[in-house]
C-alpha cells in the first residue's frame, strides 16, 4: 500500500518536483504559507511573525499601543508589509514623479553613511517633525534594435532629492535607489552553503564567459547583509525608526538633535516580536507557479542554459534544513556579486559613477506580479518587464545578453514565458 502511494506521488509531482523544494500553493496572498509543516509552537510563532510583518507601528507613547509603538521619529513606511507586499516584490515607480515608499534611497560613502542624513533618506516623519526630503524620478527613453530588427525601449532613471531639511548631502555620498525585493524563500537562501558559493565563484565555465562572482553577504541587492537577522534589524532601524537589541539606534545622526530627542527607548521592538518576524521569514515558502508541459519546461531551461544565464542564475542548489535533511531548491541565483556594467551603476551626489556589484537576483517566482500596480524589476524597479530586465544586463552578463538578443523573436518569447513561470 505504501509503495503504491509513493508511486502515485511520483507520477503527480514528476521529476522536477524533487529539485524544487520550498514551493507551496499561494491560495491567498495575504496568508503566505510556510515551506514545511510547522509544529504547534513553530506555527504559533510563524503566525505571530506574519502579524508583526503586517503591523502598522505607531508613535512612541500612543495609548494602548500594546508593544507596537516607537515608530520614527524619521522613517519611510510604518510596516514591513507596506514595502514588501505580503512577501512579494515592492512596487517601483510607474512613471515620472514622486517615487512610491517601497523605493528607498540609501545613502552611503566609503567612510560610512551620509554625515547628516544617515543610512537612509527618510521621506516621512512623525507629527511635529519634517521628513528629511522628498524623492522623485524622471525617466528618459533609450531605444535600440535586436539583430532581427525588432525594437526595444528601456527607461533610464534620473533621481531628484528635493526639500532637504538639514542642508546638502555630502558630495561623495552615493545615492542608492533600491526597491524592496520579494521575501519568498529567503530562509532557504540563508541555507545555501558558503562552500557552494565558493565552488560557483571558481567555476571555469563561468570564467570563460567573463563572469567573476564575488562573495559578500546574502541579502540586499548588493549582499550588504550577512543574515536575515541583520537585514531585519536594519529595516527596523533605518526604514522604520525602531530600535532592536541588535541595532539599538535609529537612523538619526549627531547633526539631527530633534530626531535624537524624540526617542522611544531601547529596544522598541521587543525580543519576542523580533524573533517572531525572523521565524516567519525563515520559514516563508516560495509560491508554486503552474507549469506547462514537460516539453516546454525542458525547452525553456535549455535556452536559459545555452544563453549562459544559468552561470549566474544557478538553477539548482542543495541545502541542509534544520532537521538535517538535504533538499534541492531552484532559486536561480549563485548569491554572488557581479558587475553588470555602467548602465546599472549608482552615482554619488557630485554625479560621479560608482562601480557597483549586484547580487544575482533569485528568479524563483519572478513572474508573480503584485496585487496592484505594474510589476517592476531590477534593483530600482526601472525595468517594466522581464524582457527589459534582461536587456539591462551588461558587464559580466554582456555575453549572455547578446545570446538572448540573437535568439530571434519566437525563441526570446519562449524563454521569457518560461522565466515568468519559475
Ligand atoms: C521602506 C521600505 C521597506 C520597509 C518598511 C522594509 N523593507 Fe525590507 N527591504 C527594503 C529594501 C529597499 C530592501 C533592499 C535593501 C538593499 O538592497 O540593501 C529590502 C530588503 C529586505 C530583505 C532582504 C531580501 C533579499 O532577498 O535580499 C529582507 C529579508 C527584508 N527586507 C525584510 C524586511 C522586514 C522583516 C521588514 C520589517 C521589519 C522590512 N524589510 C521593512 C525595503 C523595506
Ligand atoms: C553575470 C551574471 C548574470 C548573468 C549571466 C545573467 N544575470 Fe540576470 N541578473 C544578474 C544580476 C546581478 C541581477 C540583478 C541586477 C540589478 O538588480 O541591478 C540580475 C537580474 C535579473 C532579472 C531581474 C530580477 C528581478 O528580481 O528584478 C532577470 C529577469 C534576469 N536577471 C534574467 C536573466 C536572464 C534571462 C539571463 C540570460 C540571458 C541572465 N539574467 C543572465 C546576474 C546575471
Image (cartoon, helix red, strand yellow):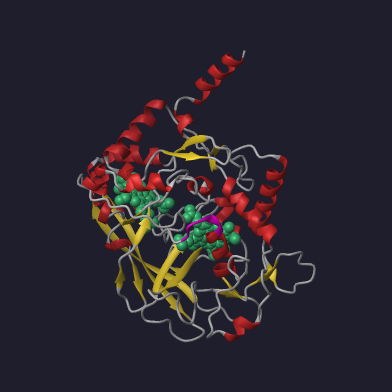
Residue pushed farthest right? 64
Is 375 or 393 nearer to us in this picture?
Answer: 393
Is 219 or 304 nearer to us in this picture?
Answer: 219
Which residue lies at the image location 62% right of the left edge and 50% below the top edge? 279
* 239 left or right of 354 in image: right
* 184 left or right of 215 in image: right
* 373 left or right of 44 in image: left
Regarding residue 179, the answer to whether it shows in the image is: no
Q: Image quarter for residue 79? A: bottom right
* 207 left or right of 232 in image: left
Image height of 392 relative to 252, above or below: above
Residue 87 among those drawn in magenta: no
Span shown in magenta: 225-229
> Residue 244: x, y in percent?
63, 66
Quadrant that contains the C terminus: top left
Quadrant that contains the N terminus: top right
Which residue lies at the image location 32% right of the left edge and 39% below the top edge? 304
Count of marks overlaid on the render? 0
Magenta segment's dominant SS is: loop
> Residue 238: x, y in percent?
54, 69
Regarding residue 222, the answer to whether it shows in the image is: yes
Image height of 347 relative to 15, above or below: below
Q: Image quarter for residue 409? A: top left
> Residue 205: x, y in percent?
25, 42
Is 226 or 348 nearer to us in this picture?
Answer: 226
Image height of 233 relative to 51, above or below: below
Amino acid at each position: 500500500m505504501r509503495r503504491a502511494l509513493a508511486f502515485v506521488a511520483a507520477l503527480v509531482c514528476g521529476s522536477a518536483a524533487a529539485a524544487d523544494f520550498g514551493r507551496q500553493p499561494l491560495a491567498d496572498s495575504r496568508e503566505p504559507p510556510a515551506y514545511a509543516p510547522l509544529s504547534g509552537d513553530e506555527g504559533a510563532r510563524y503566525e505571530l511573525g506574519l502579524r508583526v510583518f503586517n503591523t502598522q507601528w505607531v508613535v512612541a507613547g500612543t495609548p494602548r499601543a500594546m508593544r507596537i509603538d516607537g515608530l520614527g521619529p524619521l522613517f519611510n513606511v510604518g510596516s514591513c508589509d507596506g514595502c514588501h507586499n505580503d512577501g512579494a516584490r515592492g512596487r517601483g515607480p510607474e512613471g515620472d514623479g514622486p517615487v512610491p515608499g517601497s523605493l528607498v534611497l540609501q545613502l552611503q560613502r566609503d567612510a560610512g553613511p551620509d554625515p547628516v542624513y544617515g543610512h537612509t533618506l527618510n521621506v516621512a516623519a512623525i507629527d511635529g517633525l519634517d521628513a528629511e526630503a522628498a524623492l522623485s524620478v524622471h525617466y528618459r527613453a533609450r531605444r535600440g534594435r535586436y539583430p532581427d530588427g525588432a525594437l526595444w525601449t528601456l527607461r533610464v532613471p534620473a533621481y531628484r532629492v528635493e526639500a532637504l531639511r538639514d542642508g546638502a548631502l555630502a558630495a561623495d555620498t552615493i545615492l542608492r535607489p533600491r526597491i524592496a525585493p520579494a521575501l519568498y524563500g529567503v530562509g532557504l537562501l540563508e541555507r545555501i552553503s558558503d562552500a557552494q558559493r565558493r565552488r560557483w565563484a571558481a567555476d571555469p565555465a563561468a570564467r570563460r564567459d567573463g563572469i567573476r562572482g564575488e562573495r559578500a553577504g546574502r541579502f540586499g541587492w548588493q549582499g550588504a547583509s550577512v543574515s536575515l537577522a541583520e537585514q531585519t534589524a536594519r529595516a527596523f532601524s533605518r526604514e522604520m525608526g525602531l530600535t532592536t537589541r541588535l541595532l539599538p539606534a535609529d537612523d538619526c545622526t549627531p547633526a539631527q538633535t530633534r530626531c535624537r530627542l524624540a526617542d522611544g527607548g531601547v529596544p522598541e521592538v521587543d525580543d519576542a516580536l523580533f524573533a517572531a518576524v525572523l521565524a516567519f521569514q525563515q520559514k516563508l515558502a516560495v509560491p508554486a507557479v503552474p507549469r506547462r508541459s514537460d516539453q516546454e519546461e525542458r525547452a525553456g531551461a535549455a535556452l536559459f542554459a545555452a544563453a549562459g544565464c544559468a552561470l549566474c542564475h544557478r538553477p539548482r542548489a542543495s541545502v541542509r534544513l534544520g532537521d538535517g535533511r538535504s533538499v534541492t531548491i531552484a532559486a536561480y541565483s549563485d548569491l554572488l556579486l557581479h558587475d553588470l556594467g555602467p548602465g546599472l551603476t549608482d552615482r554619488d551626489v557630485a554625479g560621479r559613477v560608482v562601480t557597483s556589484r549586484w547580487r544575482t537576483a533569485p528568479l524563483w517566482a519572478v513572474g508573480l506580479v503584485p496585487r496592484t500596480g505594474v510589476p517592476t524589476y531590477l534593483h530600482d524597479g526601472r525595468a517594466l518587464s522581464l524582457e527589459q530586465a534582461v536587456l539591462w544586463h551588461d558587464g559580466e552578463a554582456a555575453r549572455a545578453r547578446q545570446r538572448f538578443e540573437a535568439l530571434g523573436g519566437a525563441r526570446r518569447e519562449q524563454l521569457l514565458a518560461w522565466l515568468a513561470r519559475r
